[in-house]
Amino acid sequence: MAIDEAISDSEATEEPIDIHLDKSRAQGGTYIYLGIGIRRWIRDPMFSMGLVTRNEKLVDSTTDADALLWKADWMIKRLPFWMLPKGYEPSRHRSLSDHTITNPENSAIIAGYAATGDAGRGGRKTFFALDEIGSVEFISGGKDEAVMDSTQHVTNCRLLCSTYGGDSGVFYETATDDNNAIKLVLDWKDNPTQNRYAYVMRNGVLQGVDPADWSAVDRYAKKSADILKKLERRGHTMEGKFRSPWYDAQCLRPGATPRSIAKELDRNPRGTVGKVFSVDTLDLMKEKCCRRPTWQGKPIFNNETLTITGLIEQENGPLKLWFPPGFQNDVPAGSYAVGCDIAAGTTGDYSSNSVASGVNQQTGEQVLEWAGMGWFAAKFARLAVALSKWLNNAYLIWEASGPTGSTFGKEVLEVIYYSNVYYRDVAEVGQKAKSRSPGWWNGSDDDKGDLFETLCIAMEDGEFIPRSEDLIRECGEYEWDHGKIVHKPSKQHKMDGKAHGDRCVAAGVAWLGCKDKPVTSLDNCSEMLHNPPYGSFAWREQREKEERREWTDDEPQFDLHDLLRA
């Protein structure tokens, strides 16, 4: 009713009226404003509604139920025949190429647009609905600002309908700034199918919000003690928070994290306080996957050729391997990704490690970890390239933000000229092309949160297999604190925010490299011929040939005439 009234008032006064619809996920907001628009499309002569969504694929489709005009067409087709405009035929009056649905009786129109700087420009609309304008795809590259600019003088009434994709962008600013927008909320807490048996935990005891539900909540508490404990271990806030059995089930779905629940259901763009990594997942990884390294020690590499020339076994060496090095320090055949996080290079009491983490792209198994202090960025870059070359010219990716990341990248690309490196995707979301910017960019807590949560989900799904106990321990040290990721030990020592190289980022970017350049088939015959698996028959045969060749090369060569003269 508030949306419909705003449209009428903007028509009557010709003054701008914008509406901000802040919603939890899956509350029917899109169908609400489509229903308002369709009603006016039937009733009001010359009514025109513009629909803007993230990309052209979601504007219109004959088969995709997520497309806005598919939804509108579906609703119109279910109206009784006497309510439809006279002469209306979907095959004639719905244009897939123009993304329009026209009323032949009164010339009203519903038109769809992709999120570009020209959306709706050059025309006039009674009403514009901007669908999911708070999403990451809208915010990325400034699409939301471009659409707001293009629709500024096209209509007097705009609806911004979305969940939060983060704590930035037009949708977030509209919610928090003092402006004249009408603020509306669609919260799961008001949804009777989702707030059933709602409760609040007080001092560990569940209390029903509605007195009529007290006995049902008591039964749920007794029956679901394991569920409540699991929620707490996964980092979800329990004490003093409005919850329900439906909400608890959403929090326990695969891939759900405190941060994603906060944004998608709680309408909290800054996330929530809680563990970044699921405690249950980390416990399972430590029990099932982590193991002592097969080999540990110190690598020796040629600083000019950047080749590994030797491995010195040491009890507390910086290099850990989860495979046995070969007779000549060979590595198993396969494709690998190496991820790096670069510290400041200091050696003080509270200094952090620079870390390189190697992952087998075919199995997802962590096979290598190097961690050490006192390595400045350029020196560490040379070691990282040496390890990458050793791991069959592995795909190298590093955290590129900050001065250490910049120095590291310049050494790799402009001094060493190592080419098998990760380049970031172009800023335009949905594009497959790569930019000219190397390395992973840590621009915000959301970026780091996405990296960590992707790694956590990969662990949960069995795609990434961690071997390092130190990695799992460090994963458990990260927490969300009012929308920011903090490394608790660093914060306690007042080192938070300084260059902090750690195993979590190194493993996270290594996994990002695996996903960015996946191996879809086994090694080809040519690669297997030149680099057979360690210990195989082909490997032993190759070693025998090399030994015969070395013996022949070392044998003194005599000329026959010189021998006879002697």
Image (cartoon, rainbow, N blue to C red):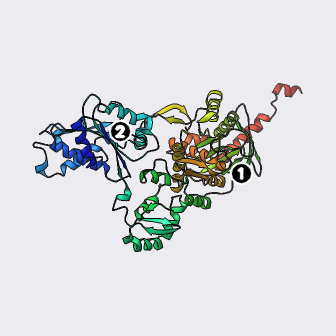
Residue 402 appears anywhere in the view: yes
Q: Circle 1 sits on which residue?
A: 295
Task: Identify which residue, 561 or 166, lies in the foreground.
Answer: 166
The tag earlier along the polypeptide, 2 or 1, is: 2
Report the Cα–Cα distance between label 2 and label 1: 50 Å
Relative to 332, residue 234 above or below: below
Percent of width and height locating residue 435: 49, 32
Task: Identify which residue, 294 or 448, lies in the foreground.
Answer: 448
- Number of numbered discs: 2
Q: Is residue 156 left or right of residue 245?
A: left
Relative to 317, residue 526 above or below: above
In the picture, the quarter occupied by the C terminus is top right
Relative to 561, residue 256 above or below: below
Q: Circle 2 sits on which residue?
A: 55
The residue depicted at 17 percent of the width and 51 percent of the height is 79
Disc 2 element:
loop
Percent of width and height locating residue 466: 60, 53
Residue 534 appears anywhere in the view: no
